[in-house]
Image (cartoon, helix red, strand yellow):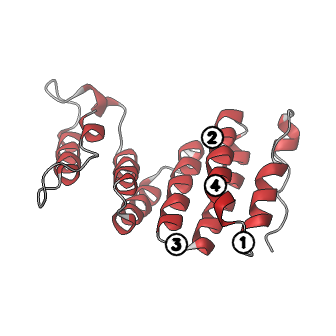
């Protein structure tokens, strides 16, 4: 997809990411015409918003990332819980980039609970491993160690134990 290639800086004052994302939005709005790119067949506005959020996060623009991720979460169909868990993971990363540890912890907890609810180990592993690594450098913050423990408590081989409620946040 062309959006990913736009996730870099090239010319000062001419943001290639904004151009690439605008083009992707235009292509998505065109719908499923014969001349539309193939990715339009499986992409939604929510998917595009989360990809935009990830681009802005990678470019160290947390305000733009937060806005795009919030938009994506608002547009996401309720049944797409695995995608919601990943979006929340990205939003936690964005909160960390903005030095908002409380928001990062809250999104981490919700992402883990959402991933647990999906019953899919791949989603849970991705969310847990990504967030554990991101929060470890912030262990000195009061709310981080319980959240790290919560993530560690989800390690288990059985599906039934992955679905148990998580410990309460402190």
Residue toward you, 87 or 18:
18
Residue identified by numbered label 1:
140
Which numbered disc flags the more N-terminal residue, 4 or 3?
3
Nearer mark to the viewer, of 3 and 1: 1
Identify the secondary structure beneath mark 2: helix
Q: In the drawing, does residue 132 fall left or right of residue 12?
A: right
Q: Are marks 1 and 4 in contact (CB under 8 Å)?
A: no
C-beta proximity under 8 Å, tags 3 and 1: no
Residue annotated with mark 2: 126
Mark 1–mark 4 distance (CA, rounded to whole Å): 22 Å
Image spot of residue 53 (x, y percent) = 38, 55
Disc 1: CA contacts within 10 A as few (<14), some (14-19) or many (>=20): few
Depth check, mark 1 against mark 4: the one in front is 1
Q: How many discs appear? A: 4
- How would you rate the neighbour count of disc 4 (Cα within 10 Å): few for under 14, some for 14-19, many for 20 or more? many
Determine which residue is flagged by label 4: 111
* For marks 3 and 2 on the same chain, the one whose residue lies earlier in the sequence: 3
- Earlier sequence position, callout 2 versus callout 4: 4
Alpha carbon separation for disc pair 2 and 1: 24 Å
Which residue does the image show at 55% across and 50% down from the upper left?
A: 84
Label for residue 112? none
């Amino acid at each position: 997809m062309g959006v990913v290639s736009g996730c870099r800086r090239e010319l000062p004052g001419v943001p290639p990411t904004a151009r690439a994302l605008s083009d992707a939005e235009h292509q998505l709005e065109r719908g499923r015409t014969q001349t539309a790119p193939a990715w339009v067949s499986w992409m939604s506005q929510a998917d595009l918003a989360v990809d935009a959020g990830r681009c802005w996060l990678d470019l160290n623009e947390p305000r733009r990332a937060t806005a795009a991720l919030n938009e994506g979460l608002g547009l996401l169909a309720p049944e797409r819980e695995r995608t919601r868990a990943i979006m929340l993971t990205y939003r936690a990363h964005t909160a960390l980039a903005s030095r908002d540890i409380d928001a990062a912890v809250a999104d981490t907890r919700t992402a883990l609970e959402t991933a647990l609810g999906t019953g899919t180990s791949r989603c849970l592993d991705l969310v847990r491993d990504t967030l554990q690594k991101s929060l470890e450098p912030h262990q000195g913050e009061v709310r981080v160690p319980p959240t790290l423990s919560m993530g560690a408590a989800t390690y288990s081989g059985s599906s039934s134990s992955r679905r148990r409620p998580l410990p309460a946040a402190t």
